[in-house]
Image (tube, helix red, strand yellow):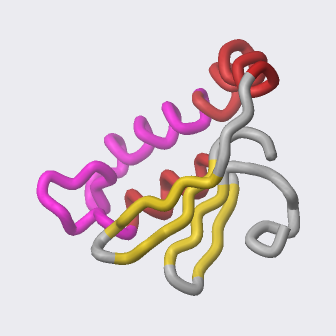
Amino acid sequence: MQINPQHNVPCLVDGDFIINESVAIQIYLGEKFSDNKPSLYPKDDLKIKSTINQRLVFNSGVFWDSVMKPFVRFFSFTLSVVHIGGENCILTFGAF
């Protein structure tokens, strides 16, 4: 609850920055590490970036409702600590 007042998951803690919602997290991480080669989220190619965004929206809509929502209801998940760029980040999935 302290990490995410909206009480939903997933949630990412990156230093003093906290963000929730899976698509927002994926875009954030893509932008943060877009200078890595090869870039998974290119800054300069609007068509490729738009195609990636299209897939992200599909994941949060159609895929989530038909596959993941029933899966999450059946299982419960806990907090995981991941290391991103030498920093400790907390990433959550599922329901508390």
When asked about the image quadrant of residue 5, the answer is bottom right
Mark count: 0
Q: Is residue 56 left or right of residue 84?
A: right
Q: Is residue 94 above or below residue 87?
A: above
Residue 16 in magenta?
A: no
Depth check: give the residue in front, 48 or 76: 76
Q: Residue placed farthest to the left in the image?
A: 37
Q: Is residue 81 left or right of residue 67?
A: left
Residue at 58% x, 86% y is: 16
Rendered location of residue 85, percent (x, y): 29, 72
Residue at 81% x, 74% y is: 2
Q: Is residue 51 above or below residue 75?
A: below
Rendered location of residue 79, percent (x, y): 62, 54
Residue at 60% x, 36% y is: 57
When asked about the image quadrant of residue 11, the answer is bottom right
Q: Residue placed farthest to the top in the image?
A: 66
Q: Is residue 65 left or right of residue 58?
A: right
Q: Is residue 27 left or right of residue 37?
A: right
Q: Is residue 85 above or below residue 75?
A: below
Residue at 70% x, 39% y is: 94
Q: Is residue 43 above or below residue 55?
A: below
Q: Residue placed farthest to the bottom in the image?
A: 16
Depth check: give the residue in front, 71 or 26: 71
Rendered location of residue 32, percent (x, y): 37, 69
Rendered location of residue 8, percent (x, y): 80, 52
Image: magenta residue range: 32-58
Quadrant of the frame with the N terminus = bottom right
Residue 50 in magenta?
A: yes
